Image: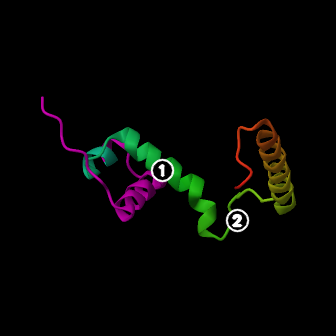
Amino acid sequence: MSRRPRRNHSAVFKAKVALDAVRGDKTLAELAKLHDVHPNQITDWKNQLLKGAANVFGAETAEPTIDLKELHAKIGQQSLEIDFLSGALTRVGLLSAKR
């Protein structure tokens, strides 16, 4: 039995199949035969559609907020540590005085 080459489906095709699955007019087996895709793939596309449906109507995505104060504090702390360590290495003789 030879394997069929991997296929890349367009977003429009995926949306069409997923919407057919959401409607529920046909069973997964019927949809799979009609569109020539595996039933598990249809289920995945349907779940992706349902998960992202709120974004269609302008719902905000849950992006993490960035705390700039915390990041600046971390940069400052790392700068102090680098200066301290370079001074210590220079005194020990493992680093030249010139940078």
Report the magenta residues as a range. 1-30
Which residue is nearer to you in this view: 88 or 57? 88
Of marks 1 and 2, the one in the foreground? 2
Q: Residue at x 44, y 43 (%)?
A: 43
Does 67 appear in magenta?
no
Report x, y in % for residue 77: 85, 50
Q: Residue at x 82, y 62 (%)?
A: 68
Nearer to me, 55 or 84? 84
Cα distance in 3D space between marks 1 and 2: 21 Å
The residue sitting at 43% across, 54% down in the picture is 18
User: Which label number is shown at residue 46?
Assistant: 1
> Which kind of residue does numbered mark 2 sit on?
Glu
Could you say where residue 21 lies in the image, as x and y percent from the top left?
A: 43, 51
Which residue is the site of mark 2?
A: 60
Residue count near mark 1 (Cα–Cα under 10 Å), binned few <14, some 14–19, many ≥20: many
Q: Upstream in the sequence, badge 1 or badge 2? A: 1
Circle 2 — which element? loop
Q: Which residue is at the front of the view, 74 or 11?
A: 74
Residue 59 at x, y = what percent? 69, 66
Considering only vertical position in the picture, is 13 above or below 89?
Answer: below
Taking the image as shown, residue 89 lies to the left or right of residue 29, namely right
